[in-house]
Image (spheres, helix red, strand yellow):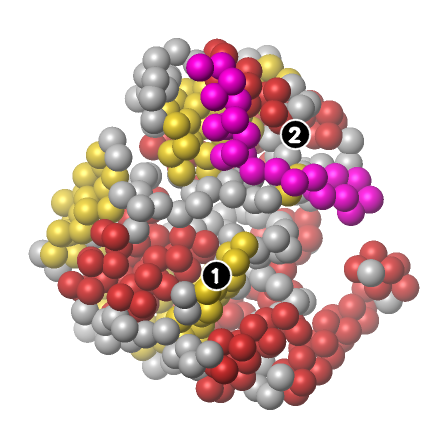
């Protein structure tokens, strides 16, 4: 259906088509966002984790919460997997979901807001109470025809959110978000000292990265998280800021975050012994490097590809180059080629690895090879898909998949 629309509607009219769908959707479902507080999280990476952590904080505070992320839909205690292969669903689905959340007496709705979703007006006619900015790095550049357009798409969420803005002040693009007016602004940081009477700044201090978690302080309250990677402190701070913006105490934020065992497919430890196996969604250069840096003092065996055939081809050799910098062994494999030749994608990633990489088309075989290669105390890092339930191939076909299940299945076979 989407391909037919693109084929028969001129690009100049596609924007009007998407906007019209947003108008019809909000009238059809009765402007449901006016009856519930909506929190939108945008940025290149970290959105899913922030949505998950913020939901737990609000629930710990006694609220009934609905949330929507790339991994799941949730209304109160009821949740189900997001199998759409779409982080931010279409206008009708979102408005219908909002209406259902209100009918089931949810007070909050927390969702990921993507640049493509904004471009297609999926955010329109949603009254956002809070807008959150995690970080920004090059992504979807070809779809937006440049980084500036990508950034402008993210900024639109803030321009349309008048009440509360929550911003990662350590990101080099933060100044663009800070320029947009709002009734309240809350900044979060690990690094910068900001002296301002007008801005509330939440800063993490006494940071420690442990083998199985993170610890830090916020205003002399200790947080001990079962999450890996320094970048997850930023995600935790964003969630804490959401809680504080809604009158939730730091003590309740601490209680909620310390109960969180992990996020599916986000730095998820699938196997602990005799070697560690990590599955993560990282599919951008910046996200991939952050994952590898978490284990840079360990011997790494890395399985990766390049998400999204036909998109962001520029990053393929960059991903290979990053893998060559950090990984002892590199296996480049298939991810989501769509209608592109998967071997061509693999070859382009391998170019950046400067001859260090093995190329294995079959993702299961690639994972098996990593397991066979690993020695005790090695760390295998499998990136690109996280907890996604499909591999997307030609002609719109989807092959059922789960990196985590494949890992445990192959591990049991070679034990």
Residue 393 part of the magenta segment: yes
- Asked if marks 2 and 1 touch (Cβ < 8 Å), the reply is no
Which residue lies under the disc numbered 2?
Answer: 334
Q: Is residue 378 above or below residue 178?
A: above
Against 310, residue 99 (above or below) is below
Task: Mark 2: give few (<14), some (14-19) or many (20+) Cα within 10 Å.
Answer: many
Residue range in magenta is 392-415
Farthest-out residue, right = 8
Q: Is residue 11 visible?
A: yes
What residue sits 49% from the left and 86% below the top? 34
Q: Which residue does the numbered mark 1 point to in the structure image? A: 79
Instruction: Give the structural element (helix, strand or loop) at label 2.
Output: loop
Where in the figure is residue 84, as x and y percent of width and height? 64, 55
Which residue occupies the foreground of this view, 332 or 74?
74
Describe residue 123's horizontal placement relative to residue 176 as left or right: right
CA separation in Å, label 2 and label 1:
30 Å
Q: Residue at x 23, y 42 (%)?
A: 214
Name above or below for residue 162 compared with residue 396. Answer: below
Give the residue displayed 65% in from the left and 87% down from the top. 27
Main SS class of the magenta portion in the image: helix
**Which residue is found at the position 82% from the left and 60% from the top?**
1
Label 1's element?
Answer: strand
Q: Residue furthest left?
A: 220
| Residue 398: image location, x then y, percent | 72, 43
User: Would you say residue 284 is visible in this rendering?
Assistant: no
The image position of residue 253, as x and y in percent, is: 23, 62
Q: In the visual, does 389 lie left or right of 20? A: left
| The quarter of the displayed image where residue 243 is located | bottom left
Instruction: State which quadrant residue 218 falls in.
Output: bottom left
């Amino acid at each position: 259906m989407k391909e037919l629309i693109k084929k028969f509607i001129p690009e100049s009219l596609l924007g009007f088509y998407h906007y019209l769908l947003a108008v019809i959707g909000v009238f059809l479902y009765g402007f449901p966002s006016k009856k519930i507080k909506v929190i939108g999280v945008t940025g290149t990476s970290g959105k899913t984790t922030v949505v998950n952590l913020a939901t737990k904080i609000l629930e710990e505070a006694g609220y009934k919460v609905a949330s929507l992320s790339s991994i799941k839909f949730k209304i109160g205690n009821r949740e189900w997997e997001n199998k759409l292969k779409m982080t931010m669903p279409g206008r009708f689905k979102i408005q219908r979901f909002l209406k259902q959340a209100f009918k089931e007496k949810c007070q909050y709705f927390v969702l990921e807001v993507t640049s493509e979703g904004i471009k297609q007006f999926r955010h329109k006619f949603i009254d956002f109470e809070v807008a959150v900015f995690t970080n920004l790095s090059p992504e979807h550049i070809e779809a937006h025809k440049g980084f500036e357009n990508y950034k402008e798409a993210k900024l639109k969420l803030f321009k349309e959110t008048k009440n509360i803005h929550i911003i990662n002040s350590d990101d080099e693009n933060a100044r663009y978000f800070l320029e947009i007016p709002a009734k309240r602004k809350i900044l979060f940081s690990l690094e910068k000292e900001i002296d301002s009477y007008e801005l509330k700044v939440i800063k993490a201090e006494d940071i420690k990265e442990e083998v199985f978690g993170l610890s830090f302080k916020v205003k002399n309250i200790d947080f001990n998280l079962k999450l890996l990677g320094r970048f997850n402190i930023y995600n935790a701070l964003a969630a804490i800021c959401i809680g504080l913006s809604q009158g939730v105490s730091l003590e309740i934020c601490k209680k909620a975050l310390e109960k969180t065992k992990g996020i599916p497919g986000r730095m998820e430890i699938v196997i602990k012994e005799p070697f560690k196996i990590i599955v993560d969604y990282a599919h951008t250069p910046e996200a991939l490097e952050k994952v590898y840096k978490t284990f840079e003092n360990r011997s790494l065996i890395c399985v990766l590809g390049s998400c999204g055939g036909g998109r962001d081809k520029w990053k393929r050799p960059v991903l290979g180059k990053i893998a060559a910098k950090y990984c002892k062994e590199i296996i480049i494999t298939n991810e989501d080629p769509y209608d592109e030749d998967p071997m061509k994608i693999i070859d382009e990633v391998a170019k950046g690895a400067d001859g260090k990489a093995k190329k294995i088309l079959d993702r299961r075989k690639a994972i098996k090879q990593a397991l066979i290669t690993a020695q005790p105390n090695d760390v295998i890092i499998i990136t690109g898909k996280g907890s996604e339930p499909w591999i997307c191939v030609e002609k719109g076909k989807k092959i059922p998949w789960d990196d985590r299940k494949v890992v445990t299945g192959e591990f049991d076979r070679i034990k």
